Image (spheres, rainbow, N blue to C red):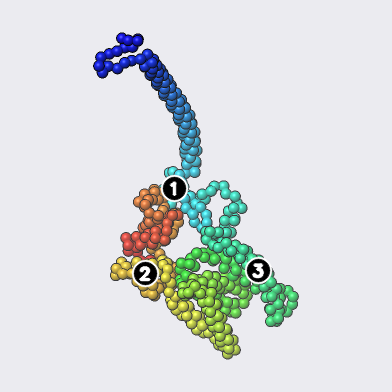
């Protein structure tokens, strides 16, 4: 050791105080850093633990609030269920009371613009087991009157079944005919006066009034018959031919007034009713026939030309009548000849029409042909084989679209049939006492359902409906 230094052997290093000081300082700093790291880690761990604790607290709070909300919802549902149950019990009690008082509602139907319901009466059998009544009890008499009037003056399904312009057009048309009808009384009186029928004021007025009554009776008959207007779109050939027969019947009654002039008013009224009904039939079936002729959406042109031809023929016939009347021929012979010619031409007129739609008669032809030959006839063949004359006393073995009261005699029969056809949009039944099958169409039925129901009846029973 020399001069306070530390000397080692060969290769040994010497340590100075400065180095010791630096080493001590470094160790101290390392220790401090380690201590700070430990403290920082401890604080971070504590913070994480605290954060997890807070998160668990928030989760418990959310769960508590969720349970509280579910509890409130459960209590609310229970209250609503108790209220519904109370209402159901009350309705059941009132319904049971109503059933004991009024009977059990078997079914409801809509016919003629009026809704009906069928009520089963306890202790009754047969035809009286099911009572028919309006679906709405205690209806306002004014509403009943409006419904009755609407069944005569508006189409079935109005206003959905017509265009929006239909209502104003018919309103103004009614006003026009009102003034025209009033004016016709005065014009008729003037014409009769000019023809020399009046020998005095009272006679002229009496004749004019009788003439107006005759025309009024015809208009009333026209309105009553117009209620069955929906049939004009189905069996138009049959109705048009029957209208021609009515026209000749009216003409014959008019000619009879010359034989019994003291019965002029009743005979003239009856004749005018028949001729007006025939006129309604002719005018109502004209448009569908012209529509069947139009191939290029030219129904207006077809109608105009058809009316022109009719007017020309009418003028020529009028000229022939004037010329023939001057010869004073036999009235009965002339009527028979002209009437036969009229009916023959009317029959061939309707037979010449070819309609591509199905009605009861044409559908019967199609089904019968399919059952007999296995083939579907053409439109030409079906129209050619269609019968245009059905006599009133002919049996109708199938009633399509019948009322519930017609098809079923008691509620049990209706319920049994309804169970058998629960997947169909129609009901089919057969009443042996009337020897007729009935098809009741449900509200949701389509055209395919109607065709299937009719085919099913014909196929199963081999009924002939043509």
Q: CA distance from mark 2 to mark 1?
A: 36 Å
- In this view, the residue farthest toward the bottom is 327
**Mark 2 or mark 1, which is nearer to you?**
2
N-terminal of the two: label 2 or label 1?
A: 1
Please tell me the numbered disc located at residue 365: 2
Query: In the rendered image of this protein, does residue 180 appear above or below residue 44?
Result: below
| Label 3 packing within 10 angstroms: few (<14), some (14-19), many (20+) | few
Please name the residue shown 61% across and 65% down the image. 169
Label 1, secondary structure: give it. Answer: strand
Q: Nearer the viewer, residue 432 or 450?
A: 450
The quarter of the picture where residue 155 lies is: bottom right
Residue found 59% across the figure and 50% down from its top? 140
Which residue is identified by label 1?
106
Q: Nearer the viewer, mark 3 or mark 2?
A: 3
Task: Check disc 3 and report the residue beneath it.
Answer: 176
Residue 32 position in % (x across, y down): 40, 17
Would residue 125 be found to the left or right of residue 7 on screen? Answer: right
The number of discs equals: 3
């Amino acid at each position: 050791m020399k001069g306070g230094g530390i000397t080692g052997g060969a290769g040994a290093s010497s340590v100075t105080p400065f180095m010791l000081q630096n080493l001590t300082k470094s160790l101290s700093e390392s220790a401090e850093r380690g201590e700070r790291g430990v403290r920082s880690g401890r604080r971070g761990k504590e913070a994480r633990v605290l954060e997890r604790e807070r998160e668990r607290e928030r989760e418990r709070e959310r769960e508590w609030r969720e349970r509280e909300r579910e509890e409130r919802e459960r209590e609310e549902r229970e209250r609503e269920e108790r209220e519904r149950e109370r209402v159901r019990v009350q309705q059941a009690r009132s319904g049971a009371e109503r059933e004991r008082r009024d009977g059990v509602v078997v079914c409801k139907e809509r016919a003629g613009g009026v809704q009906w319901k069928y009520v089963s009466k306890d202790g009754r059998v047969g035809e009286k087991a099911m009572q028919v009544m309006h679906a709405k009890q205690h209806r306002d008499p004014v509403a009943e009157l409006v419904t009755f009037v609407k069944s005569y003056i508006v189409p079935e399904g109005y206003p959905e079944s017509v265009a929006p312009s239909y209502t104003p057009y018919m309103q103004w048309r009614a006003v026009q005919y009102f003034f025209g009808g009033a004016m016709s009384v005065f014009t008729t009186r003037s014409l009769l006066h000019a023809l020399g029928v009046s020998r005095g004021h009272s006679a002229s007025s009496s004749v004019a009034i009788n003439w107006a009554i005759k025309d009024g009776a015809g208009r009333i008959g026209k309105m009553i018959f117009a209620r069955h207007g929906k049939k004009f779109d189905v069996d138009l050939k049959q109705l048009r031919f029957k209208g021609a027969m009515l026209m000749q019947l009216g003409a014959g009654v008019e000619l009879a007034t010359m034989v019994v002039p003291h019965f002029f008013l009743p005979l003239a009224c009856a004749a005018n009713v028949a001729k007006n009904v025939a006129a309604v039939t002719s005018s109502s079936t004209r448009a569908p026939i012209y529509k069947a002729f139009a191939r290029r959406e030219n129904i207006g042109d077809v109608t105009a030309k058809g009316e022109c031809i009719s007017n020309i023929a009418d003028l020529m016939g009028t000229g022939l009548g004037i010329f023939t009347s001057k010869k004073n021929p036999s009235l009965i012979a002339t009527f028979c000849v002209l009437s036969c010619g009229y009916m023959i031409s009317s029959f061939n007129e309707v037979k010449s029409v070819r309609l591509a739609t199905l009605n009861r008669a044409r559908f019967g032809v199609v089904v019968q042909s399919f059952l007999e030959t296995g083939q579907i006839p053409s439109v030409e063949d079906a129209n050619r084989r269609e019968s245009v004359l059905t006599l009133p006393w002919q049996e109708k073995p199938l009633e399509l679209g019948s009322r519930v009261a017609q098809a079923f005699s008691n509620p049990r029969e209706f319920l049994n049939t309804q169970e058998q056809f629960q997947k169909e949009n129609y009901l089919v039944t057969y009443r042996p006492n009337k020897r007729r099958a009935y098809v009741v169409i449900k509200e949701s039925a389509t055209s395919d359902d109607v065709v299937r129901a009719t085919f099913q009846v014909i196929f199963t029973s081999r009924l002939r409906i043509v």
